[in-house]
Image (cartoon, grey):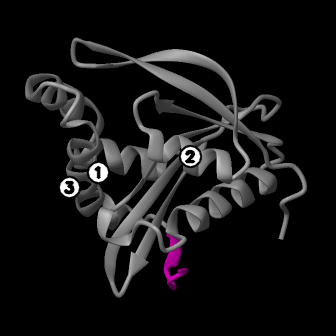
Amino acid sequence: MTAFFEIRRAAPSDAAALAAFATRLFRATYGDDTSAADLDHYIAGAFSAEIQADEIADPSGAVFLAMAGGALAGYAHLLVTLPADGPALLNRIYVDADWRGMGLASQLVDAVATECAVRGVERLQLTVYEKNARAIAFYRKAGFMVVGHTTFTVGGDVQNDAVMELDVSGRLP
């Protein structure tokens, strides 16, 4: 089932709501595998309203919000290294559990891929926690392929991630 969502660029006025939303979803995603202290440490350095405002204002990035009936249902954060001769990074993509399975993640990936094409980027990479089987299955279905492995540190917890990549060339609208 595919539902209608408004996908739009985040504005500075969205920073506080995005910080609260990102914090809640990060805790929900990693809370079973990561200690509360490690989660708190990571969240303090990644999801404050000030950090979200900086990410929204950063010209090398783009933050997309998915709205459903005026409520935040998901978001994606893209980082593009300039010059755009290497892959862009899908730094974050999260969908609220209430909206999963309705095509929202695909719509967010499409918005990010189109932004990459507009900026002349041909490849999009992301990292995904190796224990997040649902996300890995979604990324494979979306066309991402595993191209390597890396680590991701949450507080003192070092986790193993897959590096996945998608060819986004030719996506201009």
Residue matched to label 2: 137
In the image, residue 35 lies in the stretch drawn in magenta: no
Q: Name the spot of residue 31 as percent of width and height, x first.
A: 19, 37
Magenta stretch prevailing secondary structure:
loop
User: Amino acid type of disc 1?
Assistant: Ala
Number of the front mark, 2 or 1: 2
Q: For the view shown, which residue lies furthest in the left direction?
A: 37
Q: Name the spot of residue 135 as percent of width and height, x first.
A: 49, 45
Q: What's the distance in space between the residues labelled 1 and 3, CA to CA? A: 6 Å
User: Amino acid type of disc 3?
Assistant: Ala
Tell me whether circle 1 and circle 3 mark residues in contact (CB < 8 Å).
yes
Magenta-tinted stretch: 1-8
Question: What secondary structure is marked by label 2?
Answer: helix
The numbered mark, 2 or 1, whose residue comes first in the sequence reads 1
* Residue nearest the viewer, comparing 110 with 120: 110
In the image, residue 6 lies in the stretch drawn in magenta: yes
Q: Name the spot of residue 90 as percent of width and height, x first.
A: 57, 42
Task: Tell me the quarter of the picture where residue 173 sits.
Answer: bottom right
Question: What secondary structure is marked by label 1?
Answer: helix
The numbered mark, 3 or 2, whose residue comes first in the sequence reads 3
Question: What secondary structure is marked by label 3?
Answer: helix
**107 is higher (above) or lower (below) than 133:** below
Number of the front mark, 3 or 2: 2
Q: Residue at x 53, y 80 (%)?
A: 1
* Residue nearest the viewer, comparing 160 with 43: 160
Residue matched to label 1: 22
User: Amino acid type of disc 2?
Assistant: Ala
Tell me whether circle 3 and circle 2 mark residues in contact (CB < 8 Å).
no
**23 is higher (above) or lower (below) than 70:** above
24 to the left or right of 104: left
The local crowd at label 2, few if under 14, some if 14 to 19, many if 20 or more residues have their Cα within 10 Å, is few
Residue matched to label 3: 20
